[in-house]
Amino acid sequence: MKLAHVQLFEDFGTRSLAVHAIMVVTFANAVLAGLFIQGQIGLVSFVALLNFTAGLWVSHSIHSLGNVASDDEYNGIINEFLDTGTDESDSGLDTGRFGRLLALIAAVTAVSLLTSAQVLGGELFSVAVVAVGAIAVITAIIGFLIALGASYDESQQKWADKIDHDTDADVTES
């Protein structure tokens, strides 16, 4: 049985936009809960929402690894909203995508740590620093692997096209 709302999420780009929207909402609510809700409820809400966002971020990054090799039109969340001119592929590592990811990681890590410093105290803040840092490093590693995988796939495609072109030229000459 095919349902329209389920079919909508068959496309990786649609799934990615939905996951990014959920991450934005949960991260914003984590910061708001941490800064404006007092007591244990604010603390627990902040930690739970921040952990949920981090889990989504890592799992979606891993999920994105599998989309690099596909012929999907999706080229990243930024390209869905802005025309960044990435239709033509450059050779080498996709530094633009990797750079945007590093900037995003730095911004989210900074906001997480600043909010953690306001909300958590003592040993809990030390644990938060290690946890947020670990998520940032894991996401950066996965982002590098995604950029590297895209470059590898592009290189493989160029070689396959060259071999096909050379084979066609040999057949024409014979």
Image (tube, helix red, strand yellow):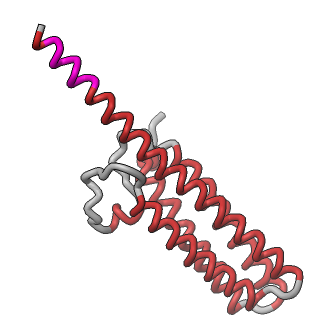
Q: How many marks?
A: 0
Measured as percent of width and height from the top left, residue 172 is found at: 11, 13
Whether residue 170 is in magenta: the answer is: yes
The residue nearer to you, when weighing 99 against 91, is 91
Measured as percent of width and height from the top left, residue 37 is found at: 73, 90
- Residue at horizontal 62%, vertical 54%? 59
The residue nearer to you, when weighing 115 against 140, is 140
Residue 149, above or below 28: above
Residue 7 visible at all? no
Residue 8 visible at all? yes
Q: Quadrant of the C terminus?
A: top left
Say left or right for 7 vs 106. Answer: left
Residue 30 image-quadrant placement: bottom right
Measured as percent of width and height from the top left, residue 140 is found at: 59, 61
**Magenta range:** 163-171
The residue nearer to you, when weighing 63 against 162, is 162
Residue 111 image-quadrant placement: bottom right
Whether residue 168 is in magenta: the answer is: yes
- Residue at horizontal 76%, vertical 69%? 131
Q: Residue furthest top?
A: 174
Q: Residue furthest left?
A: 173
- Residue at horizontal 68%, vertical 64%? 135
The residue nearer to you, when weighing 119 against 128, is 128
Say left or right for 67 vs 128. Answer: left
Say left or right for 96 vs 21. Answer: left
Task: State the predominant SS element of the stretch in magenta.
Answer: helix
